[in-house]
């Protein structure tokens, strides 16, 4: 009887772990000149881990990728510079940026469009957008999944013991 109970608990805990896993959040802003939509896809970020997140550049009117964008990224947390990149390139309208935070809390991601290259023409600009992001504590998801899993195991075990007790006195 314990094997089905443990198997059920394992299946439920796996389902709960997937249910609690957060999908990346897509955030977007249009530059002050109204021409470029900048998107970032922000995953659930934990401290002391390295993450890559995409930065996309789209035409604000057509939503089509803008190719050959040269840009800079500044990531700060509590007035400390976490990462600073300049001269990054998004040849197809998208590029990956790497970041690692040392602690939890809110952070700011600033993206500055420096130049758009169209053939042999360079369109210099300094269009900036800012995103507020969160670095979450490491323990909540793990604790929630573990507590829920243990509760399920205990409840299922208790139900199995209660059933056996009732069968023994009948």
Image (cartoon, grey):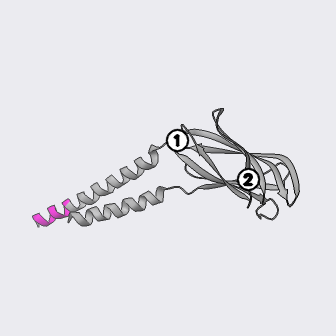
Compared to residue 131, the image places residue 22 above or below, namely below
Q: Where is residue 154 in the image (x, y as percent from the top left)?
A: 27, 54
Left or right side of 52 for 58: right
Q: In which quarter of the image is the C terminus?
A: bottom left
Asked whether residue 77 is in view, the answer is yes
Secondary structure of the residue carrying numbered label 1: loop
Q: Where is residue 13 in the image (x, y as percent from the top left)?
A: 37, 59
- Could you tell which of marks 1 and 2 lies nearer the N-terminus? 1
Part of the protein shown in magenta: 161-168
Secondary structure of the residue carrying numbered label 2: strand
Instruction: Check residue 47 in the rendering and tell me which mark sits there, or answer none.
Output: 1
Q: Position of residue 125 (x, y in %)?
A: 85, 47
Left or right side of 126 for 5: left
Taking the spot 78% from the left edge, 57% from the top edge, the residue there is 68
Asked whether residue 41 is in view, the answer is no
Left or right side of 117 for 101: left
- Residue occupied by mark 2: 89
Is the residue marked by circle 2 packed among few (<14), some (14-19), or many (20+) residues within 10 Å? some
Q: In which quarter of the image is the N terminus?
A: bottom left
Contact? badges 1 and 2 (CB < 8 Å)? no
């Amino acid at each position: 009887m314990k094997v089905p109970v443990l198997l059920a608990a394992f299946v439920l805990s796996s389902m709960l772990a997937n249910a609690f896993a957060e999908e990346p959040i897509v955030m977007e802003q249009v530059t002050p000149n109204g021409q470029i939509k900048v998107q970032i896809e922000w995953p659930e970020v934990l401290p002391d881990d390295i993450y890559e997140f995409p930065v996309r550049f789209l035409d604000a009117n057509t939503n089509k990728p803008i190719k050959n964008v040269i840009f800079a990224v500044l990531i700060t947390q509590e007035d400390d510079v976490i990462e600073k990149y300049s001269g990054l390139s998004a040849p197809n309208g998208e590029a990956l940026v790497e970041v690692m935070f040392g602690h939890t809390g809110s952070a700011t991601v600033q993206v500055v469009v420096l130049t758009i290259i169209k053939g042999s023409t360079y369109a210099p600009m300094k269009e900036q957008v800012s995103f507020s992001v969160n670095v979450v504590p490491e323990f909540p998801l793990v604790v929630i999944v573990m507590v829920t899993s243990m509760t399920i195991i205990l409840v299922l075990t208790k139900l199995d013991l209660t059933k056996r007790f009732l069968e023994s006195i009948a």
